[in-house]
Image: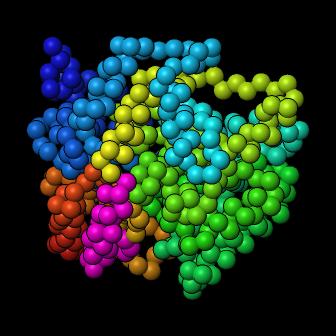
């Protein structure tokens, strides 16, 4: 019988096995085999427990994904029932019930005419598939040169060959060969780090001007798509200036450039709506990619929803004998889709979107209150996602290594005090499960505040700040 850790082995043996045999998606190779990552064993609501029995509030919701929280019987039952009913079918020549129902459900939740859905196995494969659709689309339309993808510095879109190339975060780049010939990077809409002397309104004009200039320089007949997160998540919760997405969408429409909104993080309730593109940022894009929250992280699933108008140009009479293949063995996996349907049902039944809209202002107010602490340069966020940016030298145009060390120290204190924080560079990023209560927010903020204060005291005592 598996124990609490879910294995025949005890926790110490498992920690050793991980050290010896497991490669993490973020591995400092010089330290391979010497790093011990905390082993998490159980989860309940917004809390997880580690192998030492310590209960930790899950500040980042795993990796922005455990929307309805841990230990939900409804999801476990749906997974188990579907695994016993039909554990797999080939999507090439058959359909399973959950994937058909889920496609229809998602079509009803997306804005506008985004009524067709392609399923993949996660976020990277969702974005990769959307980008491959753009290639297919322009090839069928007889525009083989219309392929460049416009992206932003500090954006993150995944870890396939193509999506990694579209990801503009410097830390993800070394030592890989990226398909950079198809990508063109624009500035990050980072309001906090905008050029000195620019107002926010000036900054918006700068970003729009840069976009227009880039389209003119490359030539609209060579640009296939603009790929953008509604807010740059891994890039540090960068919320563009008001009107940014709408104005860029207008330019895209003028030049027949597809607009792909990467809602892998913002989809399924993070900002209080099923999707943020329309409800929060006022745009109906051509394609929306999703993953993570679609199953609340219980099982892997991703996909993209596509506009009927776009699809019509390369299907039916316009298909010109084209054949679309993007051959995932697990496209529309029945167990994943059953989990997603149960997840959507729980979100609806428990009014979780309304809960996020109700509680988000309180969460953001509490996050903003940390701004008074001298180590905090900026706080920002929307819905249930936020970031505390640590800055030791407010005049420095970019985060310094010392800022990053400060943020790591804060994260360490948080962990010791019972809170997991997602450390990204010099930022503490928080995106708790959507079911978090006011009392749990208070506890999260109290630990974060205490950890920042402890770090300040420590740095002063060491004479380093
Ligand atoms: N797009 C965005 C916006 C993401 O944040 C991520 C993952 N953090 C991905 C795509 C890739 O998703 P996955 O890790 O599931 O492949």
**Quadrant of the image for the C terminus?**
bottom left
Q: Quadrant of residue 35?
A: top left
User: Where 260 falls versus 239 (above or below)?
Assistant: above
Q: Which SS does the magenta portion mostly show? A: helix
For residue 76, side relative to residue 52 (left or right): right
For residue 156, side relative to residue 146 (left or right): left
Q: 151 or 14: nearer the eye? A: 151
Q: Please give the name of the residue rendered at 46% of the width and 50% of the height, measured from the top-left corner.
A: 274
Residue 132, image x and y in percent? Answer: 69, 36
**Quadrant of the image for the N terminus?**
top left
Q: Quadrant of residue 272?
A: bottom left
For residue 40, side relative to residue 276 (left or right): left
* Count of picture labels: 0
Q: Please give the name of the residue rendered at 85% of the width and 57% of the height, measured from the top-left corner.
A: 219
Identify the residue at the far left of this view.
53
Q: Is residue 456 visible?
A: yes
Q: Is residue 432 magenta?
A: no
Identify the residue at the far bottom of this view.
197
Q: 77 or 66: nearer the eye? A: 77
Q: Quadrant of residue 28?
A: top left
Residue 53, image x and y in percent? Answer: 10, 38
User: Where 177 falls versus 353 (above or below)?
Assistant: above
Colour pattern: rainbow
Q: Please give the name of the residue rendered at 51% of the width and 63% of the height, measured from the top-left corner.
A: 280
Residue 39, image x and y in percent? Answer: 22, 35
Q: Which residues are magenta?
A: 353-379
For residue 366, side relative to residue 87 (left or right): left
Q: 232 or 412: nearer the eye? A: 232
Q: Please give the name of the residue rendered at 87% of the width and 29% of the height, measured from the top-left corner.
A: 320
Q: Is residue 154 visible?
A: no
Residue 238, image x and y in percent? Answer: 49, 64
């Amino acid at each position: 019988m598996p124990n609490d850790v879910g294995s025949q082995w005890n926790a110490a043996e498992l920690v050793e096995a991980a050290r010896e045999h497991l490669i993490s998606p973020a591995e400092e190779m010089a330290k391979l085999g010497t790093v011990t990552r905390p082993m998490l064993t159980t989860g309940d609501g917004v809390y997880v427990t580690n192998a030492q029995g310590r209960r930790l509030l899950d500040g980042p919701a795993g990796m922005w994904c455990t929307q309805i929280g841990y230990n939900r019987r409804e999801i476990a039952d749906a997974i188990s029932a579907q695994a016993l009913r039909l554990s797999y079918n080939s999507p090439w020549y058959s359909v399973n019930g959950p994937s058909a129902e889920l496609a229809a459900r998602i079509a009803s939740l997306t804005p506008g005419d985004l009524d067709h859905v392609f399923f993949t196995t996660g976020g990277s494969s969702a974005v990769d598939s959307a980008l491959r659709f753009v290639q297919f689309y322009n090839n069928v339309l007889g525009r083989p040169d219309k392929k460049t993808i416009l992206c932003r510095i500090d954006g993150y879109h995944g870890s396939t060959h193509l999506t990694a190339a579209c990801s503009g975060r410097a830390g993800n780049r070394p030592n890989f060969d990226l398909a950079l010939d198809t990508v063109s990077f624009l500035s990050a809409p980072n309001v906090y780090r905008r050029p000195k002397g620019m107002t926010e309104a000036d900054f918006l004009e700068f970003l729009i001007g840069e976009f227009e200039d880039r389209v003119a320089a490359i030539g609209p007949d060579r640009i296939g798509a603009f790929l953008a997160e509604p807010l740059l998540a891994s890039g540090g919760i960068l919320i563009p200036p008001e009107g940014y997405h709408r104005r860029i969408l207008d330019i895209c429409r003028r030049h027949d450039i597809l607009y792909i909104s990467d809602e892998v993080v913002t989809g399924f309730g993070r900002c209080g709506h099923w999707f943020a593109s329309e409800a929060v940022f006022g745009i109906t894009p051509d394609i929306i990619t999703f993953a993570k929250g679609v199953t609340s992280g219980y099982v892997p699933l991703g996909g993209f929803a596509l506009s009927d108008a776009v699809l019509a140009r390369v299907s039916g009479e316009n298909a010109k004998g084209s054949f679309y293949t993007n051959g995932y063995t697990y496209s529309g996996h029945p167990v994943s889709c059953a989990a997603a349907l149960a997840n959507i049902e729980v979100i609806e039944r428990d009014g979780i979107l309304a809960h996020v809209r109700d509680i988000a202002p309180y969460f953001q107010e509490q996050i903003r209150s940390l701004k008074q602490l001298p180590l905090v340069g900026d706080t920002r966020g929307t819905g249930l996602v936020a970031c505390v940016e640590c800055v030791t030298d407010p005049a420095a145009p970019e985060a310094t290594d010392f800022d990053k060390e400060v943020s790591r120290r804060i994260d360490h204190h948080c962990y010791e005090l019972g809170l997991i924080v997602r450390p990204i560079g010099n930022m503490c990023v928080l995106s708790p499960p959507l079911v978090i209560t006011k009392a749990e927010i208070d506890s999260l903020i109290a630990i974060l505040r205490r950890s920042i204060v402890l770090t300040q005291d420590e740095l002063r005592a060491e004479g380093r700040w």
